[in-house]
């Protein structure tokens, strides 16, 4: 990606790899699982060309950023702490925030903990989910969604071995190209549903897959899986924030085939007033027809336009 600069910063006690391009107001991009800074390649170039300084780190546990071994090192407080230190190191008082998937979850907590650092938030795919004081996440998911639900399966310490059986390239292809709406489950038999004849969509090349898989071959998947494994710990630690609302201007964009959007109850929450109640400054919910989960790659130019149309107002 021509013109994208790379450097390593020491933030919050870890070394963090950051990709960036451009000058002007900072747009901070947060990736999800199983991704890297590279998932934002189109947005980095696009927003830099529009007069912004686009910054995309590999989050803690991913790519060329440090990956502490302990699950307890992957709480919202650790990862938001990394971002607070990163923003300070960029020499700015606040940023335009754009985030997707697990990055979106972290984005919500950055807004919750440090709204002073976020001018606006363009969130892709994962809405804010307020803490329920009586429902611990993983036991609740097991009860309602079953043991094969992917977040439950990711709790298994043997998941890394299952991934290794298929190889990172095959697993990444399956996850990144999956367009099946509804609950994502990983059955014990052939959990990743790998088809040897599967072809890549036009928006994802073999070179893209190779970049992702090479980094995962080097780093492994444990860092990314630890975000899921810290869910119950996060629930315990965030008890003081029960009922607190997110108070930054937000635009939400999701594909109508997204596994999150098609999870039972989600459409009602997003469109029925619950989302707006929890995020009072939510200005827009955009649903992209025919798009799945990884919209920043699948619908890159459209995503860039939605980001720019929102942040240029502030």
Image (cartoon, rainbow, N blue to C red):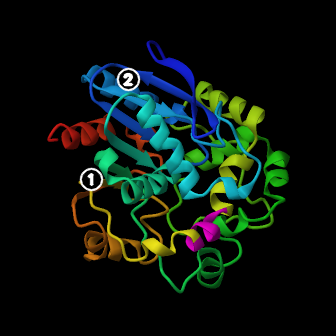
Question: Which residue: 64% across, 74% down?
Answer: 138
Based on the picture, tell me whether residue 231 belongs to the magenta stretch: yes
* Placement of 214 over or under 189, stated as above or below: above
Quarter location, residue 58: top right
Mark 1 lies on residue: 251
The x and y percentages for residue 24 are: 27, 23
Quarter location, residue 140: bottom right
Question: Which residue: 50% across, 63% down?
Answer: 181
Mark 2 lies on residue: 45
The x and y percentages for residue 255 are: 38, 54
Quarter of the image with the C terminus in it? top left
The x and y percentages for residue 308 are: 24, 36
C-alpha separation, residue under disc 2 versus residue under disc 1:
21 Å
* Placement of 304 over or under 2, stated as above or below: below
Residue 121 appears anywhere in the view = no
| Nearest to the observer: residue 193 or residue 233 | 233
Say which label, 2 or 1, has the lower sequence index: 2
| Nearest to the observer: residue 266 or residue 291 | 266
Q: Is the magenta stretch mostly helix, strand or loop?
A: helix
Q: Is mark 2 on a helix, strand or loop?
A: helix
The x and y percentages for residue 106 are: 48, 53
Q: Is mark 1 on a helix, strand or loop?
A: strand
| Nearest to the observer: residue 89 or residue 56 | 89
């Amino acid at each position: 990606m021509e013109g994208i600069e790379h450097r390593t910063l020491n933030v919050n006690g870890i070394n963090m790899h950051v990709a960036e391009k451009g000058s002007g107001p900072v747009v901070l991009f947060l990736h999800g699982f199983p991704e890297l800074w590279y998932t934002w390649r189109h947005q980095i170039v696009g927003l830099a060309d529009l007069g912004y300084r686009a910054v995309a780190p590999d989050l803690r546990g991913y790519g060329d950023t440090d990956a502490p071994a302990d699950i307890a090192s992957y709480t919202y407080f650790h990862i938001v702490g990394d971002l607070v230190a990163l923003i300070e190191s960029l020499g700015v008082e606040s940023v335009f925030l754009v985030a997707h998937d697990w990055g979106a979850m972290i984005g919500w907590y950055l807004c919750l903990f440090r709204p002073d650092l976020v001018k606006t938030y363009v969130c892709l795919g994962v809405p804010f989910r307020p803490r329920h004081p009586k429902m611990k996440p993983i036991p609740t998911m097991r009860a309602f969604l079953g043991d094969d639900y992917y977040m439950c399966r990711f709790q298994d310490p043997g998941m890394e071995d299952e991934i290794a059986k298929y190889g990172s390239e095959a697993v990444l292809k399956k996850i990144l190209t999956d367009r099946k709406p509804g609950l994502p489950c990983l059955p014990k038999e052939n959990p990743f549903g790998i088809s040897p004849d599967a072809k890549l969509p036009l928006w994802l090349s073999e070179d893209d897959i190779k970049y992702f898989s090479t980094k995962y071959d080097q780093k492994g998947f444990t860092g990314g899986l630890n975000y899921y494994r810290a869910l119950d710990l996060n629930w315990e630690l965030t008890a003081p924030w029960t009922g607190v609302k997110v108070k930054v201007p937000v635009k939400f964009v999701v594909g109508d085939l997204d596994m999150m959007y098609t999870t039972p109850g989600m459409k009602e929450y997003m469109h029925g007033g619950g989302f707006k109640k929890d995020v009072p400054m939510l200005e827009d919910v955009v649903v992209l027809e025919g798009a799945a989960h990884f919209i920043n790659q699948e619908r890159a130019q459209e995503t860039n336009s939605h980001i720019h149309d929102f942040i240029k107002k502030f």
